[in-house]
Amino acid sequence: MKRIVVLISGSGSNLQALLDCASAGQLGGEVVAVISNKAEAYGLERARLAGAATAVVANGDYPDREAFDAALMDIIDGYQPDLVALAGFMRILTPGFVRHYQGRMLNIHPSLLPKYQGLHTHRRAIEAGDGEHGASVHFVTEELDGGPVILQARVPIFEGDDEAQVAARVLVQEHAIYPLVTRWFCEGRLAMQDGKAWLDGHELPPQGYAAQDD
Ligand SMILES: Nc1nc2c(c(=O)[nH]1)N[C@@H](CN(C=O)c1ccc(C(=O)N[C@@H](CCC(=O)O)C(=O)O)cc1)CN2
Ligand SMILES: NCC(=O)N[C@@H]1O[C@H](COP(=O)([O-])[O-])[C@@H](O)[C@H]1O
C-alpha cells in the first residue's frame, strides 16, 4: 500500500476526496498524514475524523522560506511517503524542497494550465471573458504551476457567473480527477521523466489527458 502525505492550507475538500477514495479501497494508497501551514485549516479536522496523523508547520514561525521548507521536509520524511499530494497548499516551495520530492509530488490547480498559473484563477478567467475553465493535475516542479500536466477537466463559464459559481463548478471536477491521478501514481502507472509526464509508458501531451464527461 503506497504511503501518501497530503499538504493543505484550508478547507480540505480535495483532501476529503482522497480520503473517501482511500476508505473505499479505490486509491491504491493510504493517506498516512495531513500537514497544514495553517493551524485553523478545517482539513485538519477532516484528517482527524479519517484517522490520519496531522501536523501543523506554520510558515509564520520561520524566518524565511528555506527554514520553513526544511522544517516541513523533516516532518514529511518522518512519514516515509511514496507520494506528496498538494491539495490547496498555498505556499510556493523552494527549489531544494521540490528537488527532494520531484517525480513524487503532485498538485491540483484550478485552471486549464498553462493558463492562469498562480492565484485567483477563476476571477482571471471570468475577467478575460473565457467561455471555459477547469482544473489540472500536474507534477510539481520549481516553476510555479509549470510542471508537466497529467489530467485536465473542463467546465463552462456562463454569462453572469460569479467567482463562487465558477469555483464550485471547478471543484466538482477537481474531486474527480485528483483521486484518479493519485491512483494512477499509486499503481505505478504514472511517472515524470525528462520533464514530461508518462502514463503506462506513453508520454502525455503538454496539457495531459482530457477527462471525459460521464
Ligand atoms: N515550486 C512550486 N511550489 C508550488 C507549486 C509549484 O508548482 N511549484 N504549486 C503550488 C500550488 N499553487 C497553485 O496551484 C500556488 C500556491 C501558492 C501560491 C502563492 O502565491 N503563495 C503565496 C502566499 C499566498 C497565501 O498565503 O495566500 C506565497 O507562497 O508567497 C501560488 C500558487 C504550491 N507550491
Ligand atoms: N494554487 C493552489 C490553489 O488555488 N488550489 C485550489 O485551492 C482550492 C482548495 O480547496 P480545498 O482546500 O477545499 O481542497 C482548490 O480549488 C484548489 O484547486
Image (cartoon, helix red, strand yellow):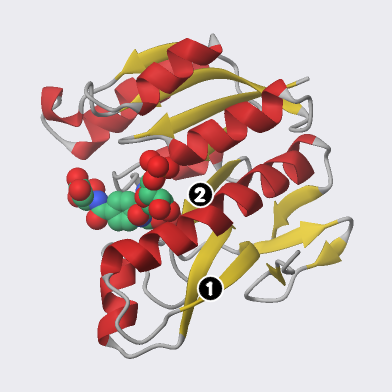
Nearest to N terminus: mark 1 or mark 2: 2
Q: Residue at x 78, y 30 (%)?
A: 28
Q: Is mark 2 within 8 Å of ligand 1?
A: yes
Eye-nearest disc, 1 or 2: 1
Q: Amino acid at mark 2?
A: Asn
Residue at 46% across, 63% down: 169
Q: Residue at x 68, y 32 (%)?
A: 21
In the rendered image, residue 20, in percent from the top left (x then y), is placed at 63, 29
List the single residue furthest toward the right: 201
Label 2: which residue? 107
Relative to 87, say whether 150 is above or below: below
Residues 103 and 83: in front is 83
Image side of residue 204 versus residue 136, left or right: right
Name the secondary structure under disc 1: strand
Which quadrant: the N terminus?
A: top right
Looking at the picture, tell me which residue is in the foreground, 172 or 123: 172
**For mark 1, does the 10 Å Cα neighbourhood hold few (<14), some (14 to 19), or many (20 or more) residues?**
some
Q: Residue at x 66, y 28 (%)?
A: 82
Quarter of the image for residue 154 reads bottom right
Please identify the quadrant where the C terminus is shown.
bottom right
- Up-down relation of residue 130 to residue 147 (above or below): below
Left or right relative to 145: residue 128? left
Amino acid at the residue labelled 1: Val
- What's the mark number on residue 155? 1
The correct choice, above or below, for 47 with respect to 67 in the image is above
